Image (tube, rainbow, N blue to C red):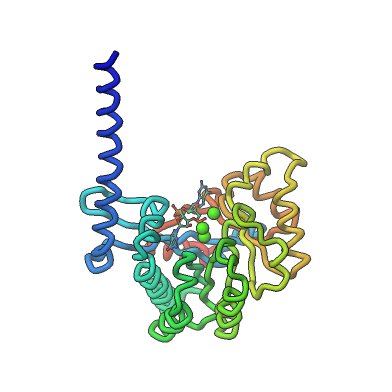
């Protein structure tokens, strides 16, 4: 009936309002998230798939909002990209990851490389290289202990990307292609790019459950070996995934099977425990 139609219209309107209001609030409150000290980093260990020893870590951003609670980066990073607030936020992440990693080294923990996610906007921003240099200078972290995770979509302007990657390499910073295989196909440009590592996206871990049917993962591992690149798998949740990856030549990975991303204190406990083994 006409009455029902009107009701459902206002229902959807109310739902839409809620979604819009949340987005607007996130957009607005992000502006003060850094100065209000609401952002933090958690760290997910990367492990040797044979020995299970910690060989590195990925820094992942978290936002504790005073009213909305913990907001996932999957929700707020796209908004931060739309408003370009990802530039100062990304700079904060770089500085904080470098500072924390240097602090761990000074406290006597074994030196590890920290991987930092970089948004495409950040990467293409004119001052990206300077931001990286400044983070290293301020923290006094040696460049070899910083890795930048970039995505295939950043390779669209291949000439400019190559220049930035070349400069990063000269600086001594490591680079990896994140979420490999999920986006813009960069198979043909890969051979000429100065990168260190390919990361196999967690969406490909599913196929490792079916014995003998892991063609995508196998292709990515073979490709990386042919190009002399390292390969890291993310999202490893089961023992069989670990075994198949290892048997096929992927030596490093991360995932809930080993560790979830953890706060700095808990990461320290993981390193202390590992030292006792
Ligand atoms: P990503 O870079 O692909 O990171 C992997 C995501 O998978 C993380 O989600 C991690 O917590 C999660 N994960 C790790 N192991 C497992 C597993 O075994 N199973 C499953 N199901 N998930 C696992 P998170 O922390 O929610 O981050 C989501 C995405 O947000 C990241 O995906 C990355 O694209 C983005 N992100 C996070 N931190 C930053 C940042 O500082 N800057 C930028 N630009 N993006 C970030
Ligand atoms: Ca990543
Ligand atoms: Ca990513
Ligand atoms: Ca991923």
Query: In the figure, residue 168 lies in which quadrant?
Result: bottom right
Residue 138's x, y, as percent?
Answer: 38, 84
Number of marks in the rendered image: 0
| Residue at x-position 29% and y-position 24% | 8
Question: Taking 115 as reference, is 206 left or right?
Answer: right
**Residue 271 visible in this rendered orientation of the protein:** no
Question: Taking 213 as reference, is 7 left or right?
Answer: left
Quick check: 184 above or below 5? below
| Residue at x-position 75% and y-position 68% | 227
Residue 127's x, y, as percent?
Answer: 43, 79
The quadrant of the image that shows the N terminus is: top left
Quick check: 9 above or below 270? above
Quick check: 150 above or below 172? above
| Residue at x-position 51% and y-position 75% | 146
The quadrant of the image that shows the C terminus is: bottom right
Quick check: 24 above or below 133? above
Query: In the figure, residue 90 lies in which quadrant?
Result: bottom left
> In the orientation shown, which residue stands out farthest toward the top?
1
Residue 70's x, y, as percent?
Answer: 31, 51
| Residue at x-position 59% and y-position 61% | 152
Question: Taking 20 as reference, is 247 left or right?
Answer: right
Residue 228's x, y, as percent?
Answer: 74, 70
**Residue 55 visible in this rendered orientation of the protein:** yes
Which of 251 and 147 lies nearest the eye of the viewer?
Answer: 147
> In the orientation shown, which residue stands out farthest toward the front?
2
């Amino acid at each position: 009936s006409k009455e029902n139609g009107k009701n459902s219209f206002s229902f959807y309107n109310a739902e839409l309002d809620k979604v819009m209001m949340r987005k607007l609030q996130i957009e607005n409150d992000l502006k003060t998230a850094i100065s209000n000290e609401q952002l933090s980093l958690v760290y997910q260990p990367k492990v040797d798939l044979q020995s299970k020893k910690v060989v590195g870590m990925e820094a992942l951003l978290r936002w504790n909002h005073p009213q909305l609670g913990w907001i996932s980066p999957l929700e707020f990073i796209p908004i931060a990209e739309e408003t370009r607030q990802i530039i100062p936020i990304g700079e904060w992440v770089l500085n904080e990851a470098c500072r924390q990693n240097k602090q761990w080294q000074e406290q006597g923990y074994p030196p590890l490389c920290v991987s930092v996610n970089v948004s495409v906007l950040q990467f293409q921003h004119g001052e990206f290289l300077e931001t990286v240099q400044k983070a290293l200078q301020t923290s006094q972290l040696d460049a070899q202990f910083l890795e930048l995770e970039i995505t295939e979509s950043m390779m669209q302007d291949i000439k400019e990307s190559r220049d930035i990657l070349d400069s990063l390499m000269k600086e001594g910073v490591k680079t990896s292609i994140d979420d490999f295989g999920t986006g813009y196909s960069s198979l043909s440009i890969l051979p000429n790019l100065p990168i260190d590592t390919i990361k196999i996206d967690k969406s490909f871990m599913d196929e490792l459950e079916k014995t003998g049917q892991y063609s995508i993962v196998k292709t990515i591992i073979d490709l990386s070996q042919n190009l002399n690149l390292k390969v890291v798998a993310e999202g490893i949740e089961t023992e069989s995934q670990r075994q198949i990856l290892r048997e096929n030549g992927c030596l490093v990975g991360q995932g809930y099977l080993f560790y979830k991303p953890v706060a700095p204190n808990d990461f320290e406990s993981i390193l202390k425990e590992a030292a006792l083994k």
